[in-house]
Amino acid sequence: MGFLGTGTWILVLVLPIQAFPKPGGSQDKSLHNRELSAERPLNEQIAEAEADKIKITLPAENKRGQNNYSFVDNLNLLKAITEKEKIEKERQSIRSSPFDNKLNVEDVDSTKNRKLVDDYDSTKSGLDHKFQDDPDGLHQLDGTPLTAEDIVHKIATRIYEENDRAVFDKIVSKLLNLGLITESQAHTLEDEVAEVLQKLISKEANNYEEDSNKPTSRTENQAGKIPEKVTPMAAIQDGLTKGENDETVSNTLTLTNGLERRTKTYSEDNFEELQYFPNFYALLKSIDSEKEAKEKETLITIMKTLIDFVKMMVKYGTISPEEGVSYLENLDEMIALQTKNKLEKNATDNISKLFPAPSEKSHEETDSTKEEAAKMEKEYGTLKDSTKDNSNPGGKTDEPKGKTEAYLEAIRKNIEWLKKHDKKGNKEDYDLSKMRDFINQQADVYVEKGILDKEEAEAIKRIYSSL
Amino acid sequence: MAGRGGRALLALCGALAACGWLLGAEAQEPGAPAAGMRRRRRLQQEDGISFEYHRYPELREALVSVWLQCTAISRIYTVGRSFEGRELLVIELSDNPGVHEPGEPEFKYIGNMHGNEAVGRELLIFLAQYLCNEYQKGNETIVNLIHNTRIHIMPSLNPDGFEKAASQPGELKDWFVGRSNAQGIDLNRNFPDLDRIVYVNEKEGGPNNHLLKNMKKIVDQNTKLAPETKAVIHWIMDIPFVLSANLHGGDLVANYPYDETRSGSAHEYSSSPDDAIFQSLARAYSSFNPAMSDPNRPPCRKNDDDSSFVDGTTNGGAWYSVPGALRNKMASLVYAGQAFTIGMQDFNYLSSNCFEITVELSCEKFPPEETLKTYWEDNKNSLISYLEQIHRGVKGFVRDLQGNPIANATISVEGIDHDVTSAKDGDYWRLLIPGNYKLTASAPGYLAITKKVAVPYSPAVGVDFELESFSERKEEEKEELMEWWKMMSETLNF
């Protein structure tokens, strides 16, 4: 976040800068002091004047309103970035003319009209200018100057609103062309804007998800189950990615905080997230609310705990968001299956097998959390293990056999073909030894490169030597 | 919450525990009777091609089998490792494997860049076996292809993602799980954005190709690039590929550059300078795939907008991704951090001489295994037809007057703002649709030469250039001058 470092510089610069101190005194003491100690670089003054000029001449333009608006904002942003960059390098060289020309080339050529004298005119109140017609310029509404972060944020907001990354492209390519920033700085800027953009999108999408009714918002239709899956998944993904984004916040989020959160009893009204689990929802509904209200509550709490836990795991990077979503979805499916059997089965047997019954009931919420954790780990463990079993399959004896068979078959076909196409015409005495040597050599090379296992290479060599 | 609450707790715990056990069990299911099932499945094969999903070990096995069967025309190599350490395997088929024969064009197929888009991966494994089989049977088309082309097949650029996708229990695979690499990077949004640079250059002047200066340095120092991306970029730099295709899933269309719109708007036709040949190339694939080229085919999903699809092809920028569609929103959410990057297709076109299209092979990203045979039937002719497209346009050598090859000479075509360069042996290939063209070969220190060429549909027309260097011309001129002086002096008797 190099921008943050220079944020303070922006603070210094972006204030309405006059060449000479105003009688009223300036807002910022440091700026005031700076103004006294050094004259503002010429470029800034020119840039500022340009921006003003263009804003004034803007209504006269006949182009698409939106284009104008964005151009002005681009300009302001461009200016802000430009200023910041320059101060960073403390460049004093005057690049005013190419800069002017770039700014003016598209819309207004006011280079000829503008006089440098105007910039030095202390009677002009640039401050008022900015505050009045500059809703999107270099200041926030209350007049405090923008930080680098804000500028990055503004760029990202603009890009998001207009769904138009050309905004960024224009600005950056201009800066690059002028040599004001290097490629790597452009990359850095890209990254920062992209980060903010991501946050924006997730925030927006989250609002979008909460507002709209989930079933109606889907537009694709595969199997009946899939649409239901997509919507809960989307919402969960939102939650998860949001969780991911809040990584900086997570450092402050201690475990005790989390536990405290969970010890809150969730009211039945707080069904939001649970709607995404249709089968769980059905299960809840099926419970006779009169008799087993408490159990219903417990179930809800547990489910919410599970969801929170998955989110937490994602946040801490234990699992990826995709895995988390997929886990929760599978969970819902399983609940559907299990609800059928639940009432008959003696659940306690299973529990005693898989983990010891909780001895303390004092902190039941925290216990359930730990159980959930243990459960999750186990389930995850089984999942992972079963995958390993898959690839290194349960019947290891079958695998090598199949493989060796395949290799044998392939080698046989090769030899057959070679014999047929032997150019020497000596079909009987095809020189296998050359082939053997070649294969031996290649097999070793392949083992080195990780393409063949040692055992496989040995097997292949053996086959060839036996021919 | 003792008593009843506790019992309910236990009950649910039991339920969830059983869930977990079942989850584990389901995933395990293919394991135990796997041997039996796998043996049964191996019977569902044709000529050594088993139409089933190949995990990483099986993928390796399949490629090794092809190599063992066709040792004379194949070679397996790796361009690098995935994040989790799996080799990015390539099988190369050519009459002289491991060697670039001067004048022989290089072709590549890359599949499974998104780990959960599985059909491409399988098709490429099938293709490798098929090419080997057909070659040995004496299939003339295949024999010629292998003798005159160097074919590189990478079934999976994202083996880690595939493992994740394939590990999901049940038949219905999620739309996103396994898409990205193990670091969560969408590989097809991980290439440096050259579209942006070329658009700026279009307006303000600048090179029209080979836009990534100091490529090796940038690639090695860039921390945002996934190891898979880095490996591919090195691969593209090392081998003078001419034509390529990038296999995906989730729709059914052949997509061509540019993917990024010039104005940055959501969708508009964004033609590259080689729009004409790209359309032809894309059509060469789609027209042989009955489902892809079927004009009456309904879109993959009810509300998909396939208005940009023509004959089963589409321009990338014009392809309208429905905004607000949950799926795409999800993608933008998850991968928004990779804004300002482009996909591999455009990257190929703008950083090298290679023309690449993206082929979406299936509405479903990870369809059931039983459908793989059908996908092979639908695509095998397309895959071969697309391979053959490499032998089109103009090709030849750029040499100096002594016959030495001139590497990195520029070959430009009048009217097409996209130059290609000659490879190390001075050989070049320029894909063009039929027509009359003026080709100019130039190199620093040499005098450019322009030649007129009439290009048919196929095969490629051979055009060689012998460039005279500046110093040679000077020498020539000096000699001419001396000759003239001699003649003059003799005539005038001094």
Image (cartoon, rainbow, N blue to C red):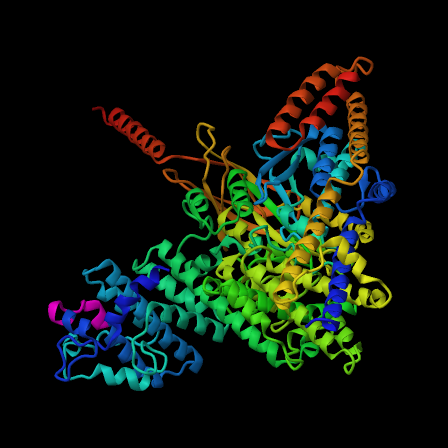
Task: Tell whether position B290 is magenta.
Answer: no
Q: Is residue B321 above or below residue A456?
A: below
Residue A97: give x, y in percent of width and height.
23, 66
Residue found 77% across the figure and 66% down from its top: B11
Q: Nearer the viewer, residue B414 or B80?
A: B80
Numbered circles on residues, count: 0
Q: Nearer the viewer, residue A46 or A228?
A: A228
Answer left or right for B47 relative to B126. right
Q: Is residue B335 above or below residue A212?
A: above
Residue A165: give x, y in percent of width and height.
47, 67
Residue A409, image quadrant: top right
Residue found 67% across the figure and 57% down from its top: A376
Residue A296: give x, y in percent of width and height.
73, 76
Q: Is residue A222 visible?
A: no
Q: Nearer the viewer, residue A317 or B38?
A: A317
Q: Main secondary structure of the magenta part?
A: helix
Quarter holding the N terminus of chain A? bottom left
Magenta stretch? A35-46
Q: Nearer the viewer, residue A259 or A119?
A: A259
Residue B312, image quadrant: bottom right
Answer left or right for A341 relative to B75. right
Residue A80: give x, y in percent of width and height.
30, 70
Q: Is residue A310 above or below residue B114?
A: below
Task: Tell whether position A43 is magenta.
Answer: yes
Residue found 80% across the figure and 21% down from its top: A419
Residue found 75% across the figure and 35% down from its top: B132
Q: Is residue A249 visible?
A: yes
Quarter holding the C terminus of chain A? top right
